[in-house]
Image: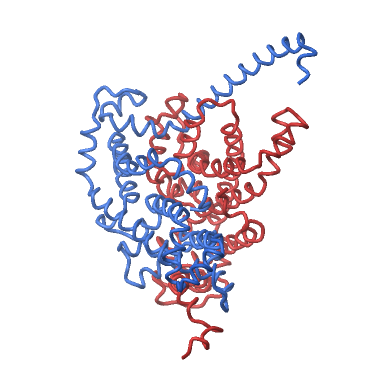
Amino acid sequence: MSAKATNVDWDKSGAAAKRKKIAATVIVNAIILVVSLLFLLPLVWIIITSMKDQMDVLKQPLAIIPSEFMFVENMKEVLRRAPWGVFYKNTIIVAVGVLVAQLCISIPAAYAFASFKFKFMSFFYLFVLARLLVSPESLLLPNYLTINGLNLYNTLLGIALPSIASAIAIIIFRGAFLEIPAALKDSARIDGCGDFRYMLVIGIPTIKSRIIAFSITSLVYQWDNYFWPMVITESVQKRTLAVGMAYFGIQAESASEWGLTMAAAILVVLPLLVAFVFFQRQLVDSFVTSGIK
Amino acid sequence: MSRGSLAKWSVKPYLYILPMVVIFGVFSVYPMLRTVFLSFMETNAIATQMQFVGLGNYSDMTSDRHFWRVVGNTAIYGFSQVILTLGLGLLFAAVANSNMVKFRTLFRLSAFYPYVLPIAVAAMVWIYLYNPSRGAINLLLDHRIQWLNSYEYALIALIIVSVWKSLGFSFLLILAGMQNISKEYYEAAALETNNHVKRYFMLTLPMLMPTLFVVCLLCVTSSFQSMDLVAIMTQGGPGHSSNVLMYYIYQEGIINRRLGYGSAMSTIFLLVLVAFTIVYLKFGERRVEYER
């Protein structure tokens, strides 16, 4: 602003400040690069190790380039040792089943909480809130008894049922329904549109982006879910990818077969990685929107 | 029945919430009540036979030194996780938001991807990295640390993985919170000071407090409840040096078939979670959604 008046001074200190700024930029960026690489190390290690054969794993554990690219052979051996197709199928059934059930249950409920006034409404809403910070894992013992009592031990339905109750879905969708302008609703009313049709035809398309955001987090969560599926299943045929991965890994670990373990890891991560590359922005946004897994 | 008579007490809303009430009843409310009920009982493995023992299970807890160890571990695990993810999350968000940074996308992705990496995969690769003789960490450090098999390091090793895994979440929420702060505030602050650090502490940090509050609660409660890493990487061992309460409840309640005792521990744990939930609802509900 007053640069012109003190032109000379400004030039001198400006050059020094500029140099200082460049130095700071370089240092900050170098630190960031190192930190990024540290965070990436596990992923890079999965990829590198998955290409190594057993000799490399044992003799040159730090080698970045394997002496021979064994990825395909490793993958063949991994596929031979465990029924990954079954694990995939189970995971997809559970994840999609849970999601569909969550949506069918939470959309009408959210709609009711947003648009009707009824007796005991806040009491029922308390039902939802009670589950907000309490994950199904914390209810492990009683859920274990319930699932056993329903004769659903070692079934996919047994894996799926406890995670269907999702408080966050109801809270998000209720908020979204409340944001729909009243005018839209009134004009639908005048056209003779009943509540249920209104919810289906106008409500759901209007809150579509929130539904998608929630769906992404829900699917990722189920893909990731390990503990409950591990506890509630016993046969190999009922394992999900996460459980199959853990069992495979722990077995291969005892023989130091890290190449195979990491190839298996790639098998599990691949769909997520592909989704991540293509839908990075959306994925990140949905986690921010949903707040809670 | 005419429509008019239904207007006051309509069944319609209840039909909408019925499926939710059933599923939440069976898998959320009932389990909580059952946990409390079972905590006063001595039962067989599947709770078909039981006997009232009053506060017996609770008094067992006071004399169980594993329990206290595990509670201590859970607290260490939870709070170190919160401090580290919040601290690093703030730092990372500030860095990612500054215009000095060149590799912003790489940085954001590398901090976020662990959050969506399946826990079983994350656990396996870290078991490998921690391997005493062939793991990259020991080879790079040129040490022979027994990361997962020693009393000193097992819990620390788990905390490192857990922070690495969940940092992306707090980082993202904090970053979103920072980007929500109106530009006008910064323009106003620019008149006051040109010092970025000062501006950060004067403006950005106070404006972020609501976000930090929510992130903090989510971190504490989710880390208290997470036992996947423990289950895969150490099974709580060696001894109970890396065990956390949720996994101990599983060990006692299901593996050792002490349902009543496990339920008593769960009851205490649920009370803590309910307390957190009340705090959250009281101060944080309005901030639950971050979009825009």
Colour approach in the figure: by chain
Q: Residue furthest bottom?
A: B1
Q: If the image is split into quadrants, where does the N terminus of chain A sit?
A: top right
Counting from the top left corner in percent of width and height, residue A35 is at: 51, 29
Residue A30: name its quadrant: top right
Give the residue at x 42% y 66%. A200
Counting from the top left corner in percent of width and height, residue B186 is at: 70, 36
A32 shown above or below B263: above
The chain drawn in red is: B
Counting from the top left corner in percent of width and height, residue A289 is at: 52, 50
Seen from the viewer's position, the closer of residues A279 and B44 is A279
B110 shown above or below A82: above
Q: Is residue A288 visible?
A: yes
Seen from the viewer's position, the closer of residues B153 and A108 is A108
The chain drawn in blue is: A
Seen from the viewer's position, the closer of residues A286 and A194 is A194
Give the residue at x 37% y 61%. A100
